[in-house]
């Protein structure tokens, strides 16, 4: 009787050990090695988001450019691989990491706590501040968040701006659209009354559309809204490399320079 107990006890210990071994085996981190073996880093983005990613004519060729593109290129250089950009709508950008269509995502993505449960994020590289764009002729109508009651407000589908608009512009009717250009067109044609964007994106659109302006309305953001590079969960080795690149780019002031240069390019009409 006693012996049986000892044996089953041993068997239990052995199977626990076995399970633990398998568990850690499954989670072996090949994030960095896989990319280096392929020789290509595929980056998911939604290039309708100047100054971070947008299309511009470069030497007569339609090219994806912007601050996020520069960051991706710096990461590619550090890893010693080629960089390939994969364009898609923003609401597919993060999911493309799960399906394996892309290795990383750089798309002005806010590293929210909710997203961080599913994806790994690098160190953040840009603070996010939300603003509201309205028609210039409506500027005096919208001076506080309360003025948006019953207004229709457009936000990009899958972005944090959906929640920002719902939570902070109380009583507004929030419309989610896939394309940012469509939101701007709807605002210009008065189908919606306002659009919520982060500041540099709003500034780039306003600079190109003199019938639009940024409203004098203060919106809150949280620290975890800052932009970061997204990776599949468990990409520890890859994250270490990417964090190193981000830190260098931030410390040397290069990120701010990338954003400024891309902004200048976008408003110069090259888009
Ligand atoms: N920062 C916001 C978010 O993560 C908006 C990002 C939209 N990016 C884009 N490329 N359209 O939800």
Image (tube, rainbow, N blue to C red):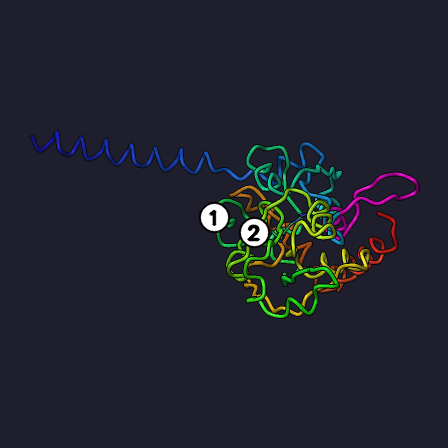
Q: What element carries label 2?
A: strand
In this picture, which residue range is highlighted in magenta? Answer: 54-74
Using the rendered view, name the quadrant where residue 18 is placed.
Answer: top left
Residue at the spot of label 2: 174
Question: Which quadrant: the N terminus?
Answer: top left
Camera-side residue of 246 and 180: 180
Q: Where is residue 83 in the image (x, y as percent from the top left)?
A: 74, 39
Camera-side residue of 187 and 33: 187
Whichever of callouts 2 and 1 sits on the residue coming sooner in the sequence is 1
Is the C-beta of the residue carrying label 2 under 8 Å from the nearest atom of ligand 1? Answer: no
Q: Residues within 10 Å of mark 1 (few under 14, many from 20)?
A: few
Labelled pair 2, 1 in contact (Cβ < 8 Å): no
Camera-side residue of 270 and 175: 175
Q: Which residue lies furthest to the left in this view?
A: 1
Q: In this view, does 21 lie above or below 184?
A: above
Q: Position of residue 215 (x, y in %)?
A: 68, 66
Q: What element carries label 1?
A: loop
Nearer mark to the viewer, of 2 and 1: 2
Q: Position of residue 74 (x, y in %)?
A: 74, 49
Q: How crowded is mark 2: few (under 14 residues within 10 Å), some or many (20 or more)?
A: many
Image-based side of 183 in relation to 267, left or right? left
Q: Does the magenta stretch include residue 212?
A: no
Q: Is residue 98 above or below residue 116?
A: above
Camera-side residue of 50 and 64: 50
Residue at the spot of label 1: 117
Image-based side of 55 in relation to 26, left or right? right
Distance in Å between CA atoms under marks 2 and 1: 26 Å
């Amino acid at each position: 009787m006693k012996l049986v107990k000892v044996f089953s006890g041993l068997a239990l210990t052995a199977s626990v050990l076995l399970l633990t071994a398998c568990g850690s085996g499954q989670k072996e981190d090949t994030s960095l090695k896989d990319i280096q073996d392929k020789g290509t880093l595929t980056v998911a983005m939604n290039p309708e988001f100047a100054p971070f990613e947008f299309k511009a004519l470069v030497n007569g060729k339609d090219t994806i450019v912007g601050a996020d593109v520069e960051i991706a290129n710096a990461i590619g250089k550090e890893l010693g691989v080629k960089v390939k950009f994969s364009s898609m709508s923003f609401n597919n950008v993060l999911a493309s990491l799960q399906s394996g269509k892309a290795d990383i995502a750089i798309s002005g993505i806010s590293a929210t706590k909710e997203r961080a449960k599913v994806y790994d994020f690098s160190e953040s590289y840009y603070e996010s501040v939300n603003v509201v764009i309205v028609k210039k002729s409506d500027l005096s109508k919208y001076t506080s968040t309360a003025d948006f009651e019953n207004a229709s407000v457009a936000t990009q589908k899958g972005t944090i701006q959906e929640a920002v608009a719902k939570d902070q512009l109380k009583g507004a009717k929030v419309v989610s659209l896939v394309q940012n250009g469509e939101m701007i067109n709807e605002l210009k044609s008065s189908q919606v009354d306002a659009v919520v964007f982060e500041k540099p994106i709003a500034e780039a659109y306003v600079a190109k559309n003199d019938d639009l302006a940024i409203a004098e309305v203060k919106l809150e953001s949280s620290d975890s809204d800052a932009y970061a590079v997204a990776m599949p969960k468990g990409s520890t080795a890859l994250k270490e490399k990417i964090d190193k690149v981000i830190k260098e780019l931030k410390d040397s002031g290069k990120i701010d320079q990338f954003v400024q240069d891309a902004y200048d390019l976008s408003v110069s009409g090259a888009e």
